[in-house]
């Protein structure tokens, strides 16, 4: 649906089954029988297993299973401990396994979840809450099976004229939508007070050496420890070597404190993210923080910015130098923060090491896989005096398979196949190809010069008084396009369609090239981690995407060029009942409804003049529809009625004012009687509502924001009767529909084609 200013079981189709498979690099042969996998796979598993502080059980169990042959112990916090050898010295290597997130703190009567953050106090960037806004999340219910949900976000179409919209940084304005309509439905799904909530995430590969994903900065240490355990030869270990994967580091280092209190150690290495400290006295706007960039090698954390390694830190530096392992120092704050409980004493010999993290504590966290390999090398030297081969352990691999299968699909099945196909404005080819395959064989389509897909369902004989009907839905979705390539290898990009940019900046992206898709992250504006940060005005925003390249030549080697489109990675995610989440429901729901109607009609219509159009470039200003309108006017075939099928952006959300656009999910399709581009004749609206009632199709009508394709035909004499379905959180990754409304929409389109 363009932003203005800035039937069931009647379908018989060939489904396009499109899946993206992230290829896992081949595992190296483990030396310890019973420990399986590879370090690249470990990092993926660690990142893609949510482990909010206090809720690390699933990840703890995976770790315990991986090292079962080494007889690990697991305590009641979830700390996993492996002890190798005996006697002195007693050396302890520790890595955290938890991440920041939320727990359910309340459930509203209408089925939304309220949240409390973990950790509850500071330590996270001021925009941490905001980066969850309008994002897909996972909720860990009491039965142990994670389910999908989304965090509510403001719909861009409903904000013009609103003077005080809710501030997404304020946790008071955070609601999670799992598709429930009541608190009872929430609890029936197994979600209750204290259920954890974490971002839906995946590990992405940038270029050839960098990896990105929410919590990668919290999980790299655990992945490194697991790889060391996989490669270690106990016979070469001197004294006692203890490996501890600790829980609740984010909430007062509780797991680490437990280990220090219960296990005597002569020295300890802590492996984890280096953390920022307080403001630098007398220097406004400058904070003590790690400053190294990914690719710097192994980092030794020091609380003095100009400090020199001493003790164990100096020994580690010597080991690194002797084995040609890149080793630098950087700032970090205290390993154990001040709390209500007096902290245990650290051994006299201790050190904190890690790797550089870009965009820390955001969904776009980035580390360099070479740094992680060097960290593992250093740990191997420390543990047993040798280095393992790292070659090929962190390679990136993606493959895509496209297949067809036959069957009797429902509207929901067809929609679930269309949503994952990428088709930003001006890049709709794959969407058009998929829809041509989904239409019945008798449906002879044509593609015009603007890329619109057109189907004539009947041509009335000369002199027939039947009205000319045109039904249109658009194929494109919002996204971005590569405008140019900077000297530092970043992509300068521009928007394709209107959106809230803060739903996308600081998040993973996908660059679509002729050679395949490439992962990237959209960088945040300068000052993003400052307390007084404000998003720049849309007209002033500079949008940059990092794909892991550092020169234009490296970008070219990745197959990326100006003009390539960029979107977020997306999927069709069923929620509770008949609700679902998926980016690009606008307008894949409309596309699906038209395809479903074609199947329901069964063949060309006798004595009817009906044309279906799947249009291009709607998000850029109704471009495809404009081309069709111009051509039909020149031919003297202007339609009498245009039914533009597009989103009815709904205020059915805890963040929106119910003053208008209050169509409710699950209550039927919607007549868009008034929007920013058109006012439908009231008599025709009433006639359409009556037609729906006569056919027992649930219907709503009302006023919403945004424009529709039908507006391009009105200047030539057509009546624009826009149709839609209620959509929550428009133009965001969190879009939510009720599939019953899709079914109602498909049914009314078939009725209109036959009888309007």
Image (cartoon, rainbow, N blue to C red):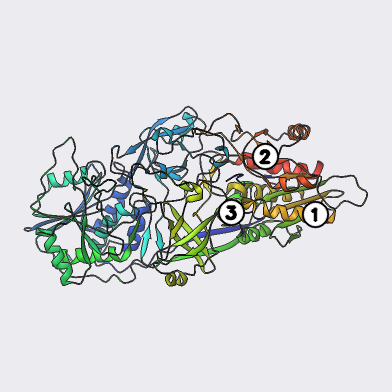
- Mark number displayed over residue 43: none
Q: Residue 177: x, y in percent?
A: 48, 37
Residue closest to the eye, 289 or 597: 289
Which residue does the numbered mark 1 point to in the structure image?
Answer: 632
Disc 2 target residue: 744
- Relative image position of residue 422 (x, y in whole percent): 56, 57
Q: Which of the pair 91/639 is nearer the observer?
A: 639
The quarter holding residue 212 reads: bottom left
- Mark 2 and mark 3: Cα distance apart in space: 19 Å
Q: Is residue 232 visible?
A: no
For the residue carrying disc 2, how many other residues have a C-alpha within 10 Å: few (<14), some (14-19), or many (20+)? many
The residue carrying mark 3 is: 417
Q: Residues within 10 Å of mark 3 (few under 14, many from 20)?
A: many
Q: Nearer the viewer, residue 684 or 572?
A: 684
Q: Residue furthest right?
A: 463
**Where 264 sits versus 108, above or below?**
below
* Residue sitting farthest toward the left: 88
Tag 2 or tag 1, which sits nearer the N-term?
Answer: 1
Relative to residue 603, is residue 207 depicted above or below?
Answer: below
Of circles 1 and 2, which is in front? 1
The image position of residue 20, as x and y in percent, is 50, 60
The mark that comes first in sequence, 3 or 1, is 3
Question: How far is mark 3 from mark 1, CA to CA?
Answer: 32 Å
In the picture, measured across the screen, residue 569 lies left or right of residue 725, that is left
Element carrying mark 2: helix
């Amino acid at each position: 649906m363009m932003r203005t200013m800035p039937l069931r079981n009647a379908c018989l189709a060939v489904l396009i089954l499109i899946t993206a498979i992230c290829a896992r690099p081949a595992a190296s042969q483990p030396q310890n029988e019973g420990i399986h996998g590879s370090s690249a796979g470990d990092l993926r598993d660690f990142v893609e297993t949510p482990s909010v502080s206090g809720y690390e059980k699933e990840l703890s169990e995976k770790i315990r299973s991986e090292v079962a042959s080494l007889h690990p112990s697991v305590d009641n916090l979830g700390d996993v401990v492996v002890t190798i050898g005996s006697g002195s010295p007693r050396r302890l290597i520790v890595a955290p396994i938890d991440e920041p997130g939320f727990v359910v703190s309340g459930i509203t009567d209408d089925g939304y979840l309220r949240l409390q953050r973990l950790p509850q106090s500071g330590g996270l960037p001021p925009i941490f809450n905001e980066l969850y806004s309008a994002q897909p999340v996972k909720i860990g219910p009491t039965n142990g099976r994670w389910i999908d949900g989304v965090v509510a976000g403001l719909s861009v179409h409903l904000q013009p004229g609103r003077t005080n919209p809710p501030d997404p940084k304020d946790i008071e304005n955070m609601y999670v939508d799992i598709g429930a309509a009541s608190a009872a439905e929430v609890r029936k799904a197994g979600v209750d007070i204290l259920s954890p909530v974490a971002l839906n995430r995946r590990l992405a590969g940038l270029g050839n050496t960098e990896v990105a994903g929410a919590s990668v900065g919290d999980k790299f240490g655990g992945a490194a420890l697991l790889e060391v355990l996989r490669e270690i030869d106990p016979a070469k270990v001197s004294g006692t070597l203890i490996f501890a994967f600790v829980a609740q580091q984010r909430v007062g280092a509780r797991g680490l404190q437990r280990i220090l209190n219960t296990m005597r150690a002569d020295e300890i290495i802590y492996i984890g993210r280096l953390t920022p400290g307080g403001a630098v006295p007398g220097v406004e706007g400058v904070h003590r923080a790690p400053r190294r960039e990914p690719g710097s090698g192994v980092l030794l954390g020091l609380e003095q910015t100009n400090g020199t390694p001493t003790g164990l830190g100096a020994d580690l530096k010597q080991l690194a130098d002797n084995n040609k392992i890149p080793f630098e120092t950087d700032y970090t704050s205290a390993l154990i923060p001040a709390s209500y409980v007096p902290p245990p004493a650290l051994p006299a010999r201790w050190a904190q090491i890690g790797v550089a993290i870009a965009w820390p504590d955001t969904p776009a966290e980035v580390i360099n896989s070479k740094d992680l390999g060097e960290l593992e090398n250093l740990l191997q030297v420390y543990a047993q005096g040798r280095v393992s081969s790292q070659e090929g352990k962190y390679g990136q691999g993606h493959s895509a398979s496209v297949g067809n299968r036959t069957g009797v699909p429902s509207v929901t099945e067809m929609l679930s196949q269309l949503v994952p196909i990428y088709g930003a404005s001006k890049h709709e080819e794959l969407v058009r190809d998929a829809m041509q395959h989904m239409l019945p064989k008798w449906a002879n389509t044509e593609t015009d010069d603007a890329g619109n897909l057109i189907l004539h369902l009947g041509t009335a004989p000369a002199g027939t008084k039947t009205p000319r009907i045109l039904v249109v839905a658009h194929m494109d979705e919002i996204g971005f396009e590569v405008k140019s390539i900077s000297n530092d290898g970043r992509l300068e990009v521009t928007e394709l369609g209107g959106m809230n940019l803060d739903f996308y900046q600081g998040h993973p992206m996908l660059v679509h090239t002729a050679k395949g898709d490439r992962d990237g992250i959209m960088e945040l504006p300068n000052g993003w981690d400052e307390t007084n940060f404000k998003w720049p005005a849309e007209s002033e925003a500079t949008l940059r995407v990092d794909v892991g390249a550092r020169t234009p030549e490296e970008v070219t080697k990745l197959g990326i060029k100006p003009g390539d489109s960029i979107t977020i990675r997306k999927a069709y995610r069923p929620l509770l009942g008949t609700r679902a989440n998926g980016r690009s429901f606008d307008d894949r729901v409309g596309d699906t409804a038209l395809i479903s109607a074609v199947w329901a009609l069964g063949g060309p219509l006798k004595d009817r003049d009906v044309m279906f159009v799947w249009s291009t470039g709607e998000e850029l200003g109704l471009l495809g529809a404009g081309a069709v309108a111009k051509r039909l006017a020149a031919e003297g075939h202007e339609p009498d009625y245009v039914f533009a099928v597009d989103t009815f952006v709904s205020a059915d959300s805890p963040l929106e004012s119910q003053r208008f656009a209050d169509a409710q999910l699950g209550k039927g399709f919607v007549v868009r009687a008034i929007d920013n581009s058109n006012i439908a004749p009231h008599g025709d609206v009433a006639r359409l509502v009556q037609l729906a009632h006569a056919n027992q199709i649930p219907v709503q009508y009302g006023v919403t924001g945004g424009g529709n394709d039908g507006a391009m035909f009105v200047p030539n004499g057509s009546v624009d009767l826009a149709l839609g379905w209620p959509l929550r959180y428009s133009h965001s990754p969190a879009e939510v529909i009720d599939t019953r409304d899709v079914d109602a929409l498909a049914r009314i389109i078939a009725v209109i084609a036959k009888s309007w």
